[in-house]
Amino acid sequence: MQEIICADAPRRNQNIGEIFLSYYQLTKPRIIVLLLITTVGAMWIAAQGKVDPLLLIMTVIGGALAAASANAINCLYDRDIDYIMERTRFRPIPSGRVSPRDALLFAIALAAISFTLLYTFANLLAALLAMSGIVTYVGVYTCWLKRSSTQNIVIGGAAGAIPPLVGWAAVTGDLSWAAWALFAIIFFWTPPHFWALALMIRDEYAKVGVPMLPVVVGDEPTTKQILLYSILLLPISLLLVYPLHVMGLVYAAFALYLGISFIVKAWQLGKTPSDRTAARSVFKYSILYLMFLCIGMAIDSLPITHTAIATISQYLASIIPQSINS
């Protein structure tokens, strides 16, 4: 791959703070936060709202380091197109602030620390799942599909769906159907999330030859796919309620409201497929959707929520017969 350095950016770090910032940016921290939310949500459900604090902290750190490693390798592999795309031109590698060799060593170190932490404080399954996430994101998405297929986000989205499996495995040591339902939620959430982004920056993807769906088939077919996946996401999110019975009425209310709102947003985008503002609205909402869905999981899993629902149910059961008899 040709070595490319952005001529308009500073080519070296001036102090320790700038060095730290450059390597921090290499990990794409904003993406990591979203992944960790799903990890915590899975742990919370698996532990029924009673997560061991040390296990939670170490699993989050281990998961964050694994995601950071994958993102750093992604930046290393994509440094040529990152230089061409305006929004990524000033990332640490194309700007020359971090060398490719140092980025690779950094990524390897992060992966090693991640595996060690997860194996030590959680279990081998959680550690191996985290490593599989790196392999899937780098090997399947970045190196194979991103530059060759319009389905890059669909298939490569499996990498982003692995964090909840890591969280579940860290608590239970296995993977139940509920864990795979969480995987499915993230898997079906990923295409509308990233295709909305792709609509916003379609011209940049076209410039570097990345076959994102809007670039190859156009805006209107892409919005139809966004709507399709947002519709499928609603019943999939409710699998945790029925037939798996790991979530209750509070989560169901969150899932229904958020899912229906997602469908409405996608439908509105479909009426104006080329409207970048509408695409941005779907993209931003997709982030809020995932955050609030996990909040719904957390609230539903709290012991106080179970107690409150049981109390209300008993009260209703006691007054309904009286109402019927009267």
Image (tube, grey):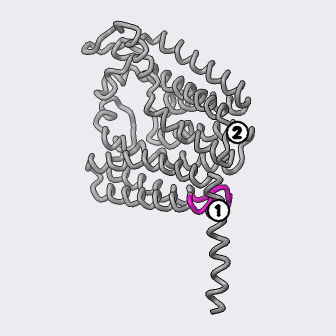
Is 116 placed above or below 154 here?
above
Residue 171 is labelled as 2
**Residue at x-position 60% and y-position 21%:** 111
Closer to viewer: mark 1 or mark 2: 2
Answer whether residue 243 is magenta in the image.
yes
Q: Start and end of the magenta stretch? A: 238-250
**Residue at x-position 50% and y-position 61%:** 256
Q: Position of residue 21 (x, y in %)?
A: 40, 17
Q: Nearer the viewer, residue 299 or 228?
A: 299
Circle 2: is it few (<14), some (14-19), or many (20+) Cα within 10 Å? many
Q: Nearer the viewer, residue 1 or 296?
A: 296
Q: Is residue 240 at least partly visible in the picture? A: no
Circle 1: is it few (<14), some (14-19), or many (20+) Cα within 10 Å? some
Q: Nearer the viewer, residue 45 or 215?
A: 45
Q: Is residue 96 at least partly visible in the picture? A: yes
Residue 242 is labelled as 1
Answer whether residue 80 is magenta in the image.
no
